[in-house]
Image (cartoon, grey):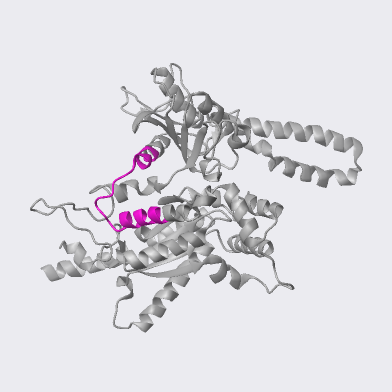
Amino acid sequence: MRLLEQIQKVSNELIIGLVGAVGSSLNILTTTLTDLLETEFAYDVEIITVSKDILAQHVDEPAHPLNAFERIYRYMDVGNQLRHDHDTDFLALQIARLIAKHRQAWQAQHPDQDASQRRVAYIIDSLKHEAEIQALRQIYTNGFFQLSLYESKTARHSSLIQHYGISPESARILIERDEGEANAYGQHTSEAFHLADYFLKLDKYNPEQSRQPELELRASCLRFLRILFADPYITPTFNEFATYMSFTASVRSADLSRQVGAVIARNNTILAVGSNDVPKFQGGTYWPYLDDETGEVRDLESGRDFMRGFDANTIEKNKIIDDLFQQLAEVIDQSVEQERTAPLKLQIQQILKESKIKKITEYGRVVHAEMDALLSCSRSNISTQGATLFVTTFPCHNCAKHIISAGIEKVVFVEPYPKSKALMMHEDSIMQKWEGREAADQPKLIFEPFVGVGARSFVNLFSVSLGIGRKLKRKSKDGYVLQWDGKTAQPRLPMYGQSYHELEQQIEQLLKDQN
């Protein structure tokens, strides 16, 4: 045993945060994880339901019983208000407080045992803001894992109607609000979803196989837990590898708004990669270059947007808004009493700023990642007929038409993109197999959500020795395969109980004792 291992206090606790859009079957996911942790890994499970355990404590007693729509909407309001009054990570701190109380209660009942060595998982149902996830990762470091469950909007809309008795219009209102509110403290499920360590989906597309989707979800959960508990014989699927490569491609983007990456593959072979960046003469996009005279790595002065100092798309959108406002203001001045013009102008200006004009993307200089990958194939005379596109973000409607035209047969995406009109505009050519249309009369381009280990944890969970976790061993000194047992296995990524200040003090004492 290394000297440091003698003083580091490793915890067996796991904190699993669930993310899913409103209407998702997180209850099924919670039940599945609980059963697997208890039966396959000998873990206790404590469930923290944010709505019941935290938000409900801040809801005033209603004058009349609330229906399901009113209750969900009220909880959204309360969550927003708490984030507004305190900070966007406030609910995460409340969750940490509850976990501490659970631990203290268990310790009081088991005074002769060390609570940190208890095999226990805390499942959080559910998180709605990226700041909550960031805070929990800061608090619990390697011990926190985010699971994101994808269910199609159609399935969630149907679930809200059938299981909660909510009207179709009310279900639509909840879904649109949950996707992402404009203010910083609102519902940000879309912004939180793609931060996951592991992605899951629940397909409800075949009523004749009502149990099949849940069995597939259980298999995915079991695989995640086996990876988490350092099963050394689970390696990446090609989908996981290609998706990781798409994220790797995305990090080279210098776009001022977001980083997106794409990979085109066929027969489990990568054909091209792409990222969203500014195109350059003679093909491709800009890269930094080495200045031979100075030895510095530089960017072309007039190349990428950050070198120019502005985002052309945002500038043009603001010009459109200003132009519309000026024209409307002139009409107001001519037709409205003077004392009413000022407040009316302010109202119109705010409406324009929050309108769909802000979603326009056509004035940007950046080539989208999907197009960059497709054009890379074109420059190299590589056919994309029958290929699969792996992309970090659901393609926009502009890219979708080119993806269809290029002969791509499947798109695997990670982050949903609510602004995309791809499915609405190209339902003749695009099929979502998880929504009951897998048996279409004619073949269509398949869009499906990614399932598997997220890019942020790919190296840590799959690499034998390069990650931050325990090194994996697959064979004995005699050359025989080592056996793995989930009921005694420890988490691959250990969570340490001491701060670096405490470790330094203990190291000082250890070194004194060594002398």
Position of 11 with respect to 338 (left or right) is left
Residue at 78% x, 46% y is 347
The magenta segment:
218-244
Which one is in front, 420 or 304? Answer: 420
Is 343 placed above or below 409 here?
Answer: below
Q: Position of residue 427 (x, y in %)?
A: 60, 34
Q: Is residue 174 magenta?
A: no
Residue at 12% x, 52% y is 480
Residue 126 visible at all: no
Q: Position of residue 100 (x, y in %)?
A: 42, 73
User: Total number of numbered labels?
Assistant: 0
Which one is in front, 272 or 155? Answer: 155
Is 439 placed above or below 194 here?
Answer: above
Q: Which quadrant is the N terminus positioned in?
A: bottom left
Q: Position of residue 112 (x, y in %)?
A: 29, 83
Q: Position of residue 475 (x, y in %)?
A: 15, 52
